[in-house]
């Protein structure tokens, strides 16, 4: 049986194709449309490219698909288009929860916290003619028999008749977006607020918490009237009095981050008596690595905390596929990705590109690329990086989620902060305060970072750097002494394992800088053609395409 899973809401659209319980391929629409979060004009189908990608990869057509599954916030026009394909829809937060649970081994008993901006419509509000209830926090317990929702906090959202932006109360995600907008960042740019928060202190936390209540029950865990004009005025006044200085902006970011930390930690109390083996965090706000790490450090529930690489709305596709399989078999299914356990294989579910496709992309850029046969393996690439080169890499399958995990990455030497400055200021043209992440083998983690609970394969936790890391690899240490580490299994991707091992032999340092391979304002590259195009516009020192290495011809490099 072939099923097509669709992810997204009004952003982060994706598609995934499964055969029985084996996921075959998945892709985010943004990687193909080349627009971040796949936000496009009204006349474009937000799923067409991703659906075609999945079907073409497996050599099937839409007529071969037995069912299409997604969450119930799937755009109405898409529901209309696919109405003849046995469309099955599930609650948004339940899809998020299932997408997290499927990453766990052997269907254990797990608690799942889902929090984001808002999810499914839960029904009308009799006393509010213009509003409906929306999911903002949900709490589930999953085990081998299925799942149970143990509680849910809901907010009020306006029933808009078109695509006019809405606001939902009782949502920590909406509060964070409100501060992000006040700081001058774009919609869905809350990651910048998180990075900025490390440069400040939470001296406005009390001010923000005048508008917040933390409840003791799952039904009222977080109360905030995000549509209160006085809240908006208060945030603007903070910035106005501080004249918009970097210090006041950083302190405001730190303050809203402290609110998120406290809200998430409160959520763990609802699983105190649930006898769980794991605690999963999912939904768009699960990308807030600072809050997750705060939870790990302070939660009473001493069980492993798991965040899936696809925890945002793109991962809805996987959750809906799990729920459909559960519905059919009556128990928790054990999904795989191309025959392998989903953790960690599902982090990189894209298709493979052939060497012929890579060479076609290179030839299309002739004569701006020059081949360099001296770099033909991960080991020789590691030695080049050790000499100071900053390189773009297309290696194997692409990632699902916002983190570059070695499939579409820029790698560099972490031993000098000047490398970080060069990448931020001259290659990626982004804010200089934003951190760069380290990648290392899991066996090396304890030599550089504290607390093994934060050794994460998907860059979704924050670890505190030890003295050795601060001394030997300062380029990956953020202003607050932390780093968002990618800990690669020692038996993981052979290319990454060799790259890291040879770099350590060359330099004595067991890690590299790993940042996403994309230009400012663009999604991470997907295809060899995307990689060539981005490389020529970024000023990188080289491009590694599936075993072949290229440099920019003289006169082809962009000016700094």
Image (cartoon, rainbow, N blue to C red):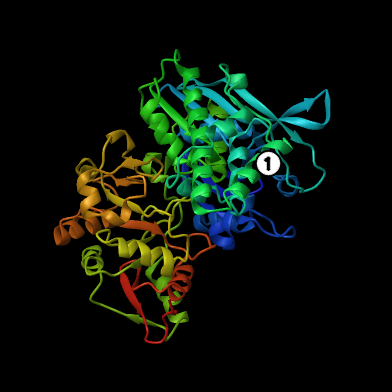
Measuring 59% from the left and 38% from the top, which residue is drawn there? 173
- Based on the displayed image, in which of its 4 quarters is residue 408 positioned? bottom left
Above or below, 148 relative to 203: above
Measuring 37% from the left and 41% from the top, which residue is drawn there? 462
Q: Position of residue 108 (x, y in %)?
A: 40, 24
* In-image side of 500 versus 77 (left or right): left
The count of marks equals 1
Q: Position of residue 5 (x, y in %)?
A: 58, 43
User: Circle 1 sits in a helix, a strand or a loop, which is it?
Assistant: helix
Measuring 38% from the left and 43% from the top, which residue is drawn there? 339
- The residue that label 1 is drawn on is 232
Depth check: give the residue in front, 261 or 77: 261
Q: Residue furthest top?
A: 273
Depth check: give the residue in front, 460 or 185: 185
Q: Position of residue 354 (x, y in %)?
A: 40, 66
Above or below, 372 relative to 244: below
Pointer 1: residues within 10 angstroms few (<14), some, or many (20+)?
some
Quarter holding the C terminus?
bottom left
Quarter holding the N terminus?
top right
Depth check: give the residue in front, 295 or 243: 243
Q: Residue furthest right?
A: 129
């Amino acid at each position: 049986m072939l099923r097509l899973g669709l992810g997204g809401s009004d952003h982060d659209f994706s598609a995934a194709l499964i055969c029985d319980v084996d996921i075959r391929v998945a892709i985010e629409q943004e990687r193909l449309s080349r627009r971040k979060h796949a936000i496009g004009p009204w006349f474009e189908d937000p799923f067409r490219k991703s659906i075609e990608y999945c079907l073409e990869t497996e050599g099937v057509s839409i007529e071969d698909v037995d069912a299409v599954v997604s969450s119930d916030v799937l755009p109405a026009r898409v529901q209309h288009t696919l109405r003849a394909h046995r469309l099955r829809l599930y609650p948004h937060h339940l899809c998020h929860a299932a997408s997290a649970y499927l990453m766990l081994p052997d269907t254990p008993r797990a608690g799942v916290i889902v929090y984001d901006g808002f999810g499914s419509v839960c029904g009308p509000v009799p006393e509010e003619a213009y509003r409906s209830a929306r999911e903002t926090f949900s709490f589930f317990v999953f085990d081998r028999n299925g799942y149970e929702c143990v509680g849910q906090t809901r907010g009020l959202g306006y029933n808009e008749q078109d695509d006019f932006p809405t606001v939902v109360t009782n949502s920590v995600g909406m509060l964070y977006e409100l501060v992000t907008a006040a700081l001058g960042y774009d919609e869905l740019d809350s990651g910048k607020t998180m990075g900025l928060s490390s440069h400040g202190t939470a001296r406005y936390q009390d001010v923000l918490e005048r508008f917040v209540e933390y409840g003791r029950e799952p039904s009222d865990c977080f109360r905030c009237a995000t549509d209160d004009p006085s809240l908006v005025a208060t945030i603007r006044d903070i910035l106005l009095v501080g004249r918009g200085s970097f210090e006041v902006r950083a302190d405001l970011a730190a303050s809203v981050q402290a609110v998120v930390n406290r809200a998430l930690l409160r959520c763990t109390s609802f699983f105190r008596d649930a006898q769980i083996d794991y605690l999963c965090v999912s939904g768009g706000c699960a990308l807030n690595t600072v809050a997750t790490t705060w939870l790990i450090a302070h939660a009473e529930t001493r069980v492993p905390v798991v965040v899936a690489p696809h925890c945002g709305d793109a991962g809805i596709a996987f959750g809906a596929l799990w729920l459909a399989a559960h519905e059919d078999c009556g128990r928790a299914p054990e999904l795989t990705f191309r025959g392998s356990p989903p953790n960690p294989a599902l982090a990189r579910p894209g298709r493979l590109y052939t060497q012929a496709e890579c060479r076609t992309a290179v030839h299309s850029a002739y004569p701006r690329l020059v081949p360099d046969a001296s770099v033909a393996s991960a080991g020789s690439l590691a030695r080049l990086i050790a000499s100071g080169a900053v390189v773009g890499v297309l290696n194997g399958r692409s990632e699902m989620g916002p983190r570059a995990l070695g499939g579409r990455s820029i790698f560099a030497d972490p031993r000098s902060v000047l490398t970080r400055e060069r990448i931020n200021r001259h290659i990626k043209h982004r804010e200089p305060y934003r951190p760069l992440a380290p990648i290392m083998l899991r066996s090396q983690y304890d030599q550089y970072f504290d607390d093994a609970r934060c050794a994460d394969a998907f860059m979704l936790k924050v670890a505190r750097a030890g003295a050795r890391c601060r001394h030997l690899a300062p380029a990956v240490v953020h202003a607050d002494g932390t780093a968002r580490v990618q800990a690669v299994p020692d038996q993981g991707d052979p290319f990454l394992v060799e790259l890291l091992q040879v770099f350590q032999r060359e330099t004595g340092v067991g890690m590299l800088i790993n940042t996403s391979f994309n230009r400012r304002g663009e999604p991470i590259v997907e295809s060899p053609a995307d990689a060539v195009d981005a490389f020529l516009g970024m000023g990188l020192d080289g491009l590694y395409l599936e075993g072949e290495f290229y440099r920019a011809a003289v006169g082809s490099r962009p000016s700094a």
